């Protein structure tokens, strides 16, 4: 069952599921964020890792080079054409064992050729969410810090899983900054 605003608010108050939690949709002169009818629009923090290929690196998820990024702490991020940047949410999430979360991009960015990608938040996952912004255009693209970046949709699960993300000690558990790809040894 997809949770509505009232149930998302209740869960967040009870279990500190989203922190800080904005209990209305803030939309004055910004890309909207906060609670919506059936989701929560999260903000992007001011920490970015902007992909650059100055070293002619190969993008390898098993051996990803930190040197392929330029780190920026800024109120807006400029993503080069046909490139991407990693960022994180302002909000810290603690997903209950009976909840599964999907994320979709905001239409404001999508209409500018900017795609936001996030994998699902599994039951009992916890941390800041690493966001990937892809600039699909041939022009530089701008992302605004502390404004809406994506919408999280919360689903109550009919039957609780046998092994949660926390139980299996998932490799991205408790991440607090922008987190690069990891492979377990």
Image: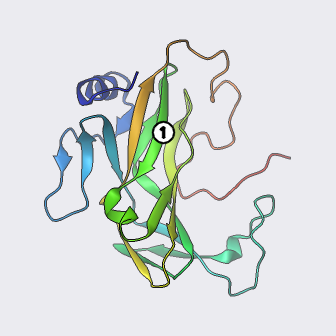
Residue 109 image position (x, y, % from top left): 36, 64
* Disc 1 target residue: 102
In this view, 38 is above or below 79: above
Residue 47 lies left or right of residue 24; in this view the side is: right
Q: Residue furthest right?
A: 185
Residue 137 image position (x, y, % from top left): 48, 78
Label 1 secondary element: strand
The residue carrying pointer 1 sits among few (fewer than 14), some (14 to 19) or many (20 or more) residues within 10 Å by Cα, namely: some
In this view, 12 is above or below 163: below
In this view, 150 is above or below 53: above
Q: Residue at x 32, y 41 (%)?
A: 40
Q: Residue at x 29, y 26 (%)?
A: 13
Residue 38 lies left or right of residue 72; in this view the side is: left
In-front residue for pair 7/21? 7
Q: Residue at x 29, y 60 (%)?
A: 147
The image quarter in which residue 178 lies: bottom right
């Amino acid at each position: 069952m997809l949770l509505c605003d009232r149930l998302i608010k209740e869960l967040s108050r009870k279990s500190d599921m989203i922190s800080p939690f904005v209990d209305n949709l803030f939309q004055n002169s910004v890309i909207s964020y906060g609670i919506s009818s059936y989701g929560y629009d999260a903000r992007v923090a001011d920490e970015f890792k902007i992909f650059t290929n100055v070293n002619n690196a190969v993008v390898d998820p098993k051996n990803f080079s930190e040197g392929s990024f330029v780190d920026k702490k800024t109120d807006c991020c400029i993503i080069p054409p046909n490139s991407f940047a990693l960022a994180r949410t302002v909000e810290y999430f603690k997903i209950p064992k009976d909840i599964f979360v999907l994320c979709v991009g905001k239409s404001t960015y999508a209409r500018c050729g900017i795609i936001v990608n996030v994998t699902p938040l599994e039951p009992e996952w916890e941390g800041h969410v690493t966001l990937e912004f892809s600039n699909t255009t041939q022009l530089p693209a701008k992302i605004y810090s502390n404004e809406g970046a994506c919408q999280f949709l919360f689903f109550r699960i009919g039957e609780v899983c046998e092994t949660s993300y926390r139980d299996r000690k998932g490799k991205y558990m408790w991440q607090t900054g922008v987190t690069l790809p990891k492979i377990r040894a």
